[in-house]
Image (cartoon, rainbow, N blue to C red):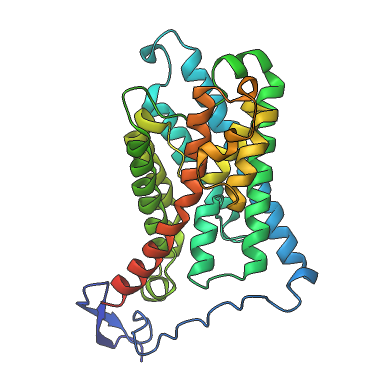
Amino acid sequence: MEGKEEDVRVGANKFPERQPIGTSAQSDKDYKEPPPAPLFEPGELSSWSFWRAGIAEFIATFLFLYITVLTVMGAKRAPNMCASVGIQGIAWAFGGMIFALVYCTAGISGGHINPAVTFGLFLARKLSLTRAVFYIVMQCLGAICGAGVVKGFQPTPYQTLGGGANTVAPGYTKGSGLGAEIIGTFVLVYTVFSATDAKRSARDSHVPILAPLPIGFAVFLVHLATIPITGTGINPARSLGAAIIYNKDHAWDDHVMDILGGTIHRSSSCGSLPPACHQSPSFQDQNLISFCLFVLFIDVRLCSLFVSEFQNI
């Protein structure tokens, strides 16, 4: 067989190419779609790999919040944007950390680091409900701890500089912020689904190796576009962790209700409180943004369906 070649068609567009026999890319007819993950995996809770994956998600989200919140606060502390890393530096911090952390944790937990990604993969039947819930809990806890460590290092600057919490910038409406976050999250999740598509990975061997790079770049580019609007969320754990630590006692009442779906309108969370306990306008913006980020889960399902159909064309 040595020295002989065969005609194969590789790539998404099926370009013809000559390759040695036995080394050609796997064809569509040879590829078998992996079975969907069951809703509850028997014996999953007794597996060490399950708990190790959750710990990896916790550590990754912890480090992600620690580095990125410090970068945001450093930029805000400077007298002007030219004297700091600026928007580009903040975007690089977010994108670069995602690139590094996905690379480090992809083989352990899949490198989600984002409840929106976890929820999207669950809807696509890529992981069980038990694992999805465990991942999301660990991601949120890691984000809270990461922001808490930053505040512990410098409590006064943390409060005066906003603690890295998301707000709608002056001059933009809440609808604009919601739209920016929806599109930004779609870009991220679409990139994740494309970079981790099993059929594409079987066809093009380089795709799994390069997966962290396009995901990190997607985060970087979305931050460049939406930092001036909302500070960029696209990660419910990141927004929730920063808001809880920054707003202290007031955050739990509204954010936990948002996550559970108990509060649909912002007014219902304030209606039963006396006027003296009503939240400040800045916190109301942060509360709305965090709620909107969880609403973005809806468009994740659309993204997963779009990717699966597009890849089959």
Can the viewer see residue 108? no
Q: Residue at x 43, y 7 (%)?
A: 79
Choose between 258 and 38: the one closer to the eye. Answer: 258
**Outermost right residue:** 46
**Outermost top residue:** 79
| Rendering coords of residue 72 (x, y %) | 50, 25
| Rendering coords of residue 302 (x, y %) | 37, 64
Q: Which residue is drawn at 37% across and 48% down?
A: 182
Q: Residue at x 73, y 79 (%)?
A: 42
Rendered-image quadrant of the N terminus: bottom left
Rendered-image quadrant of the C terminus: bottom left
Residue 248: which quarter of the image?
top right
Number of labels in the image equals 0
Left or right for 223, reference 271: left
Choose between 12 and 272: the one closer to the eye. Answer: 272
| Rendering coords of residue 80 (x, y %) | 39, 10
| Rendering coords of residue 61 (x, y %) | 61, 44
Please say if 36 is above or below 235: below
Please say if 94 is above or below 171: below
Q: Residue at x 68, y 59 (%)?
A: 134
Can the viewer see residue 54? yes
Residue 109: which quarter of the image?
bottom right
Residue 189: which quarter of the image?
bottom left
Please say if 10 is above or below 96: below
